[in-house]
Structure formats: structure tokens, C-alpha cells
Image (cartoon, rainbow, N blue to C red):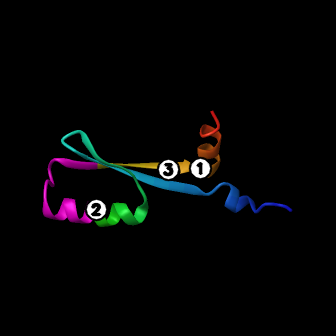
């Protein structure tokens, strides 16, 4: 069977949330990030909180996991 190339090279987003440089949440998916970031950022710590978005190809994930 031939695989669909668009499924082979899908991208996965993951997020890390930091407070004062300390990681509070790591590897959140889009849904988790939206909920947690919305509550933290809009309610608390606006000047001390930041996030990092990491975009990975599924191909990269499977290649890295093989070691």
C-alpha cells in the first residue's frame, strides 16, 4: 500500500510554559496550552510568564526515538 505523503510529513506542535525562567509545563498539546495559558496569562503573572512553541515533523520524532 502507498502511504499518503501529507500524512507522512505532518507537524506536531508542543508548548512549554515558563514562569521567571522556570519550566512550569512541558510538552503541552494545542488544547492543553490554550486552556492553561489563557488562565495563567490573563489572571496572573503577565510580566513574568512566557512560552515556547516547538514544531516537529512526525518523521523527526520517529527518527529521534529510535536510538
Q: Residue 50's x, y, as percent?
A: 25, 49
Q: Is residue 65 left or right of residue 41?
A: right
Q: Residue 48's x, y, as percent?
A: 16, 47
Mark 2 and mark 1 residues within 8 Å of each other at the beta carbon:
no
Q: Residues within 10 Å of mark 2 (few under 14, many from 20)?
A: few
Which quarter shows the C terminus?
top right
Q: Residue 21's x, y, as percent?
A: 23, 39
**Residue 39, relative to residue 61: is it above or below?**
below
Q: Residues within 10 Å of mark 1 (few under 14, many from 20)?
A: some
Question: Comparing marks 2 and 1, which lies closer to the viewer?
Answer: 2
Mark 3 lies on residue: 55
Q: What are the residue bounds of the magenta stretch?
A: 37-50
Based on the displayed image, in which of its 4 quarters is residue 63 positioned? top right
**Residue 56, relative to residue 65: is it above or below?**
below
Name which residue lies at 69% across and 56% down. Answer: 8
Name which residue lies at 54% across and 48% down. Answer: 56
Mark 1 lies on residue: 57
Amino acid at each position: 500500500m502507498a502511504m499518503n505523503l501529507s500524512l507522512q510529513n505532518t507537524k506536531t506542535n508542543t508548548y512549554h510554559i515558563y514562569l521567571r525562567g522556570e519550566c512550569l509545563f512541558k510538552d503541552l498539546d494545542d488544547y492543553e496550552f490554550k486552556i492553561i495559558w489563557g488562565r495563567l496569562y490573563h489572571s496572573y503573572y503577565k510580566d513574568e510568564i512566557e512560552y515556547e512553541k516547538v514544531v516537529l515533523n512526525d518523521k523527526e520524532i520517529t527518527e529521534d526515538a529510535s536510538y
